[in-house]
Image (cartoon, rainbow, N blue to C red):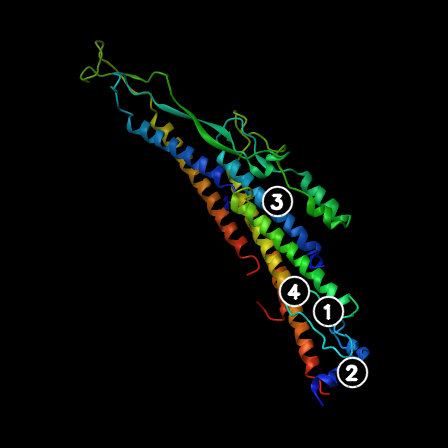
């Protein structure tokens, strides 16, 4: 009995009950596909919660990075002498980025855990 | 959705006060530089910044508190000790400068700690 | 990049105080000069300061007082005549035996010297403070 076949035979409702796997449930005959760079969730018929959550997070982090870059550019060009604002903005952007990376790690971990489940 | 983790009111308040602290140092620099200039009146953060900030924080509207900008204005309470109208007293300015530095250090420590704590919560590892 | 707050202001002040110190030194050096290049006794020089408005970028957009640095307005000559001393032996003595001395009062100049030095040191401590604050700022989050 191939592994692929056994996964496919799990009812999708069971899959969706697993933590962090809300977006993974797909059709019975298809392996769930998760893009591991954190953009978007499953490309399946999944309810759009977790995927869109990740997407929102990415765009929020991107905004934060842009803000930080903006403030830093002002300081570099001499338009502003608020060094502390630049430092704080960069640190905040770093923390936001870390949050995103850790979320991604957890999602990947959960997926791998899921894949390891015995038939 | 990332912004709420930086919305702690103390954090925002500290950030605003840090702006004011840096500005105050510049005012003190200007005062000390002009300690001998005839007719110069000492500068400081305008007093309505403190009252306005407190009012906005008390009303709970953190976003509007973050919009507030500190400004410099002439210190109306300073008295002139000299015939030429200069209101700067060097010893007072040096005291203010030292006090301001401690305030600045405190605020940077607060902000720094906040960020480190967030990192710890996110990664589970002390940075 | 103006990374140390208030550095422009303090730089102007340090310059001005240095000039003042130079002038005081010149006065002190010439307390006994009875004949200068123009044939007259040395007259003390006086430095006068004035504020120089710095365009503070942050506050250029609207309210708030701009920072003011200081600069030397002019170095003028103190015209009050100095003492006349009776000394017929002096090479610069006039026909009546009186010598025109410079109008430099040593005590006054020493007080000026001390004041200028103090002001210079005060400005140095402003820079030092600003640098420490900037160093602390860079430590945020580390």
Check whether the beta carbons of the residues at disc 1 and disc 2 lie within 8 A of each other: no
Q: Nearer the viewer, residue C94 or B46?
A: B46
Instruction: Give me the residue at 56% from left, 51% from top.
Output: B102
Foreground label between 1 and 3: 1
For the residues labelled 1 and 3, the Cα–Cα distance comes to 49 Å
User: Which residue, given by chain and number where applicable, does mark 4 sit on?
Assistant: A100
C-alpha distance separating marks 1 and 2 = 18 Å
Label 4 crowd bin: few (<14), some (14–19), many (20+), radius 10 Å: many
How far from the left and from the top, in percent, is residue C81?
Answer: 34, 16
Identify the residue at the far front of this view.
A29
Secondary element at tag 2: loop
Q: Between disc 1 and disc 2, whose residue precedes?
A: 2
Q: Earlier in the sequence, mark 4 or mark 1?
A: 1
Mark seen at residue A10: 2
Decide: is A86 above or below B39.
Answer: below
Q: Tell me which residue sits at (68%, 80%) in the image.
A: A113
Tag 4 secondary structure: helix
Q: Secondary structure at mark 3?
A: helix
Other residues around mark 3 within 10 Å, as few (<14) / some (14–19) / many (≥20): many
Numbered label attached to residue A43: 1
Q: Mark 4 and 2 residues: CB-CB less than 8 Å, in contact?
A: no
Residue lying at 64% horizontally and 51% vertically, measured from the top left: B15
């Amino acid at each position: 009995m191939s592994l692929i076949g056994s996964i496919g035979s799990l009812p999708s409702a069971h899959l969706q009950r697993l933590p962090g796997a809300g977006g993974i449930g797909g059709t019975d005959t298809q392996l769930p596909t998760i893009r591991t760079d954190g953009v978007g969730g499953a490309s399946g018929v999944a309810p759009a919660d977790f995927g869109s959550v990740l997407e929102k997070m990415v765009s929020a982090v991107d905004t934060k990075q842009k803000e930080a870059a903006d403030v830093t550019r002002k300081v570099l060009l001499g338009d502003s002498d608020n060094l502390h604002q630049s430092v704080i903005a960069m640190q905040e952007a770093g923390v936001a980025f870390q949050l995103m990376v850790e979320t991604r790690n957890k999602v990947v971990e959960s997926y791998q855990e899921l894949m390891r489940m015995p038939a | 959705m990332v912004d709420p983790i930086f919305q702690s009111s103390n954090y925002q308040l500290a950030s605003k006060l840090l702006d004011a602290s840096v500005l105050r140092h510049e005012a003190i620099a200007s005062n000390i530089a002009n300690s001998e200039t005839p007719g110069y009146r000492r500068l400081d953060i305008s007093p309505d910044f403190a009252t306005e900030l407190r009012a906005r924080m008390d009303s709970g509207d953190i976003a509007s508190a973050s919009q507030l900008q500190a400004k410099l204005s002439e210190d109306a309470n300073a008295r002139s000790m000299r015939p030429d109208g200069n209101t700067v007293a060097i010893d007072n300015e040096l005291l203010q400068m030292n006090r301001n530095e401690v305030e600045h250090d405190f605020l940077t420590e607060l902000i720094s700690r906040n960020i480190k704590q967030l990192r710890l919560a996110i990664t589970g590892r002390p940075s | 990049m103006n990374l140390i707050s208030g550095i422009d202001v303090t730089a102007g002040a340090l310059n001005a105080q240095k000039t003042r110190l130079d002038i005081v030194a010149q006065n002190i050096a010439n307390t006994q000069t009875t004949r200068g290049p123009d044939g007259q006794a040395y007259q003390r020089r006086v430095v006068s300061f004035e504020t120089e408005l710095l365009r503070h970028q942050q506050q250029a957009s609207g309210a708030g007082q701009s920072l003011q640095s200081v600069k030397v307005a002019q170095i003028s000559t103190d015209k009050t005549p100095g003492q006349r001393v009776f000394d017929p032996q002096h090479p610069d003595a006039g026909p009546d035996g009186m010598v025109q001395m410079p109008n430099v009062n040593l005590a006054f100049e020493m007080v000026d010297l001390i004041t200028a030095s103090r002001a210079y040191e005060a400005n140095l401590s402003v820079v030092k403070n600003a640098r420490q604050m900037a160093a602390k700022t860079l430590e945020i989050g580390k």
